[in-house]
C-alpha cells in the first residue's frame, strides 16, 4: 500500500486521499453505498454485481508459519503436534485455513486466535506455536525468524485487489490508482 500511494501521489501530487482501515466486507459495503470511491481489499466470496469493477493485484496461498528452528519438520506434523496460533475464523484467510484443516483431517491444539497477521508472525517467531495463514510477503515479516512452508494440494488463495463502482465521478483518479498499483505489483 505505501508503495502504491507513493507512486500515485507522484502523478497526482495535489490529490487528497483518506485512508480507512477495516475488514474487507465493510470496505466492500462502503464502496457499494458510495461512501468510499475505491478500496484495496479481499475479493468478496460471491460474484460482484455488474455495477462494480475489480482489479486483482495479488494472490496469497496458505502456508504453515513455524519458528525457523522447526523449518525442516513436516508441515502436517507441525500442525498436529505443536500449539496452534489460529488466524481469526471470521476473516477470509482464517475461513480458508479452517476449511483446509478440516479437509486435511487435522485437529490442531489451539493456543491463540488473532486477527492480525503481524501479531501471529511475532508469536511464531518467539516459539509460541505454529500457524496456518495467508503467505503475506510483507516488509514486517523480513526481520522475524519464521519459516514459511508450502502445502500440497492447496486450493485456497487469498485474492487482494482494488474494487470500485463502474459509474463514479472519480473514475479517472480511480483508474490512475489502479494503473499505479499494477506497476508496483509488476515490479515485485
Image (cartoon, helix red, strand yellow):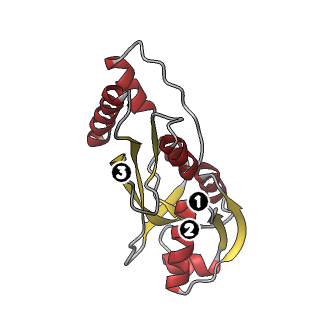
The residue that label 2 is drawn on is: 95
CB atoms of marks 1 and 3 within 8 Å: no
* Disc 3 element: strand
Q: Name the mark on residue 58.
A: 3
Q: Are marks 1 and 2 in contact (CB under 8 Å)?
A: yes
- Point out residue 188 in the picture as x, y percentages from the top left corner: 31, 42
Label 1's element? loop
Q: Measured from the top left, where is residue 86 in percent x and y?
A: 64, 66
- The crowding category of the residue bearing disc 3, from other C-alpha atoms within 10 Å (few below 14, some 14 to 19, many at least 20), is some
The number of callouts visible is 3
Q: Residues within 10 Å of mark 1 (few under 14, many from 20)?
A: some
Quadrant including the N terminus: top left
Q: Quadrant of residue 131?
A: bottom right
Point out the residue furthest to the top here: 14
Numbered disc 2: secondary structure = helix
Q: Which mark is residue 91?
A: 1
- Toward the viewer: 32 or 132? 32
* Residue 82 tag number: none
Amino acid at each position: 500500500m505505501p508503495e502504491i500511494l507513493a507512486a500515485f501521489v507522484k502523478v497526482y501530487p495535489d490529490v487528497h486521499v483518506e485512508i480507512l482501515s477495516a475488514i474487507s466486507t465493510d470496505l466492500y459495503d462502503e464502496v457499494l453505498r458510495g461512501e468510499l470511491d475505491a478500496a484495496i481489499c479481499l475479493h468478496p466470496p460471491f460474484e460482484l454485481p455488474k455495477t462494480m469493477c475489480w482489479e486483482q493485484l495479488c494472490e496469497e496461498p496458505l502456508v504453515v508459519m513455524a519458528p525457523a528452528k522447526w523449518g525442516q519438520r513436516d508441515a502436517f506434523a507441525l500442525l498436529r503436534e505443536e500449539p496452534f496460533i489460529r488466524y481469526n475464523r471470521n476473516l477470509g484467510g482464517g475461513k480458508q485455513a479452517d476449511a483446509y484443516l478440516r479437509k486435511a483431517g487435522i485437529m490442531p491444539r489451539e493456543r491463540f486466535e488473532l486477527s492480525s497477521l503481524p501479531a501471529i508472525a511475532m508469536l511464531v517467531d518467539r516459539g509460541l506455536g505454529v500457524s496456518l495463514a495467508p503467505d503475506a510477503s510483507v516488509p514486517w515479516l523480513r526481520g522475524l525468524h519464521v519459516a514459511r512452508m508450502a502445502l500440497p494440494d492447496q486450493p485456497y488463495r487469498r485474492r487482494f485487489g482494488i474494487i470500485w463502482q463502474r459509474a463514479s465521478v472519480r473514475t479517472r483518479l480511480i483508474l490512475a490508482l489502479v494503473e499505479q498499483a499494477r506497476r508496483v505489483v509488476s515490479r515485485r
